[in-house]
Amino acid sequence: MTDTDTAEIGMGVTVTKTGETGAFGGELLTINFGPHHPSTHGVLRLIVDLDGEQVKRLKPVIGYLHTGIEKQMEALRWQQGVTVTDRHDYLSPPINNLAYALAVEKLMGVDVPPRANALRVIMSELTRLSSHLVWMGTSGLELGAMSMLMYCFRERDTILDMNEEISGYRMHTSYIRPGGVMADATPRFLDLLEKFIVAMPGHVDEYEDLLTMNPIWRSRTIGIGRLSAEDAKVLGASGPMLRGSGVAWDLRKQMPYSGYEGYEFEVATSDMCDCYGRYLVRIKEMRESVKILRQALDRLPDGPVNVDDRKMLPPPREELETSMEAVIHHFKLFTEGYSVPPGDVYVAVESGRGENGCYVVSDGTHKPRRVKFRAASFVNLQPLERMAMNHMVADMVAIIGTADTVLGDVDR
Amino acid sequence: MGQNILTTSLGKLIGWGRGNSVWPAQFGLACCAIEMIATATAGVDIARFGSEAFRASPRQSDLMIVSGRVSQKMAPILRTIYDQMPEPKWVISMGACASTGGVFNNYALLQGVDKIVPVDVYIPGCPPRPEDLLNALMILQERIKAQGITPRQ
Amino acid sequence: MISENLIVDRGVSAGDNWITIAAESAHEALSSLKEEGYRLLVFLTCVDHLADSSREWPSRYELVYQLRNMDSLEQLRVRAFVDGDPPHVDSVSDLFPPGNWDERETYDMFGIVFENHPDLTRILMPDDWVGHPLRRDYPVGGEVVEFSEEHETWQTAPDKA
C-alpha cells in the first residue's frame, strides 16, 4: 500500500483503500471515524469498512476518555468517593451517587429514612429527565432538527437550577450520599419542582409536535438500527435500548430500590426495535418520570433526611458546641473516615441509559478495596456493529445517537 | 514589521475583526462539553459574541475550547488537532480537569492540558457555568484586540 | 444443572448469593449455569487481594462473574480464584457476548489472560501502555500535590517520591 492510498478528508475522518472488492464491484474503503468527530457524542472512534456507502465492518475503539475512576476510588475514603462517582456518567450524576450510596449502605446494613428515599427518587427522576433532554437535543441536532437543542436545553436549565437550589451545584451535585442525602430540600426547591411538574407535560407535547410526525425525523429513524428483542437480551443491552426492542425490563419495577415499589408508573416499551422505537420509549419515559415526581412530591414524608448514626455522618452543628462526644465523632469522621465491614455487594439502579451498577468490595478499612462500575453505555455500545451493518454511513450517526452512549461512562 | 501609524491603526481594525469573530473548534471531551453546548443554546447565547459558529474541522477554527479531562490516550490527538488549526489560534482550558487534572490525580489523565498546548485562558469550576465560559471568551477577546496584526511574536 | 462437585464454596454476602468454583472449570461451570437460566452476564471483573489481611484468600486474584436470570430475577455471583504471572483462565465470551469487552477490560486493567478470546487486546489504555493499572501494586500516579506530606519528601528526595 502506498501513501496515496490513505487520505485525510477532514473532520477527523481518514480514508484507506483495503484492496478487497465489495458486492457492487467497487473496492472496500476503511474509514477512521473520530475520535473527535462531532456526531460521536464525545470521543468515540470507529473504524468502519465501507462498500460504497454501506457499512460492512465496524470496530469501535474506546478508552479516549479513560479517567481511572475505579483506581481513584481506591485512593479515596468511603465518603470522599461520592464526588468521583458523579463524573463517570456525567449526564446522570445523582443516579451514579445512588448506586454507590446503596451499595455502601447495604454493606453497612443501614436503612435511610423515608424522606431521604423520597428525595432520592425525586433527584433520580429529575436526572433521568435532564439526561433524556440532552439526548433529544443533541440527537435532534445531528439528524437535522436544530431547534430541538434550543427547546430541550431550556427545560434542562430549569432542572439544573433546581439542582443548584438543593445542592449548590449545577451538574455534579454529589447530593445522594451513603447514609442519606446532603441536605433537606429547601422550600424554594419544592416550589420550583411544583412549577416544573405542572409545565413539563406541555413541553413534552411540544417536542412530540416537533419530532413524532416529522417526515425527516421519521425517515432518518424508522427501520434504522434494528435490534431484535432476543439479540438485545443476549447482548446484555439495558435501558431504552432493551425497552425499545419490546422487552419490558426496568430495574425500578423488576428489582425496586429506594421505595420505587410504592410509585405507580408504566414501563415504556416499543415493538419497533429501531431508532424510532427508542425515541418513543424515551418520550414515554419522560412522561412517566413526571408522574413519579408528582407522586413523590405529593407524598413527601416529613422527618430526618439522614440516618442517625454518628459513626457514619457528622453530628449537627449545634451539638458540636455542647457535646465533647460529638466533637470526637466529628474529628474521627473528617480525619480517618468510617470503615465498612468486609464483604462485597452489587447494587444496580436504572439510569437514563440502562443498568447502572456498582460492585463494591470492602476489606474492613476506611477505603474501598475495589469499586467497579457496571456501565450501561459500555455494554450498550457492543451491539453497534450488529445494528449498523448494511446501513448507510450517515445512518450510523442516528444509531450512535439513539444508543445514547456517554463516553465518560464507557471509559470510566 | 515595525510599528508605525499605519500598522497600529490597521492592527486595531484587524484585532477588532478577529476578536469579534472567534470560531471555536467543536471539540467536546467530557462533562464540560455539555455546558459548552449549553453556552451555545438560547439561554446564554454565545452568538452575541460572534462565536456561535462551532466548526467541526480544526482547519476552519481559531479557538480550541478544551472542555473536559484529557486522557493519556487522547493527548496526542488533541495536539494533532491543535497543530491542524491555522494561525493565529487560541486555547481556552475549560474546567478543573483540563486546567490541572481536577479531582483525578492519577495515571490515566494529563495533569493539565498546558503540558501539551499553550493555554490563553483558564476557567475554574467542575464544570464551569456557561456564564464562566462567556466570561473567558470576553477576556480572550480583549486580549486578541490588544495583540494587533501579528499575535504571538 | 450445575453439578455440586464444581462448587468449591457457597455463601451469602450482604444479601447476594455467591458460589466459588475452581478457575480451571470456569467455562464448564458457567455454561451449565447458562443452561440453568442465568443467561445474562451482568459484568465480569477482577479483585486484587494483594496484602489484604482482613480475610484468608486462596490466591491473589479473584475473578467475579455476576449472572442474572431475567425470568426468575435471581442473581448469582460466581467467584474463581486465579494465580500466576500472568494468570490464565478460559474465556467465556463465546457463552456470553457482553463478556467480550469485559474480558478485554479485565486483561487491560489486571493482566489476566483469557484463553480462546477472539481479540484479547488492550481496550481502555493505549496499546503501548506498560503495566496493568488496577493491580494494587501499580501506583495511583498523577502528580505530587503541593504542600502535602508527599510533597515534602519529594522535595528532599525526588527519586524516592
Image (cartoon, coloured by chain):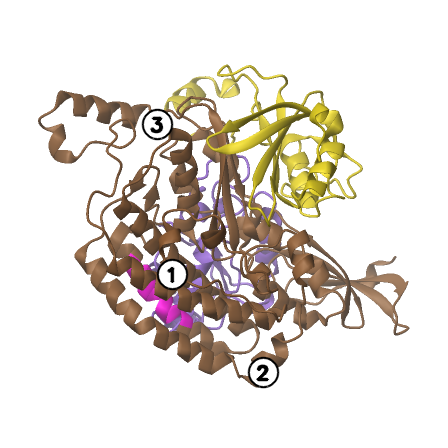
Disc 1 marks which residue? A264
Residue B92: x and y in percent read 44, 56
Mark 2 on the same chain as mark 3: no
Which numbered mark, 1 or 3, is in the foreground of this view? 1
Chain A on-screen colour:
brown
Colour yellow belongs to chain? C
Q: Chain of mark 2?
A: A
**Residue identifier under label 2:** A216
Left or right of A209? Residue C110 is: right
User: Which of these two is toward me, B63 or A224?
Assistant: A224
Residue tagged 3: C147
Marks 1/2 same chain: yes
* In-image side of A169 versus C68 (left or right): left
Element type at marker 2?
A: helix
**Where in the figure is residue B19, as x and y percent of width and height?**
41, 69
Image-quadrant location for residue A388: bottom right
Range of magenta residues: A152-162
* C-alpha gap between disc 2 and disc 3: 58 Å
- Which amino acid, mark 2? Ile
Which chain can be seen in purple? B
The x, y position of residue A274, in whole percent, is 63, 69
Considering only order in the chain, which callout, 2 or 1, is on the residue closer to the N terminus? 2
Give the residue type that dot 3 points to: Phe
Q: Quadrant of the N terminus of chain A?
A: bottom right
- The image position of residue A136, as x and y in percent, is 49, 69
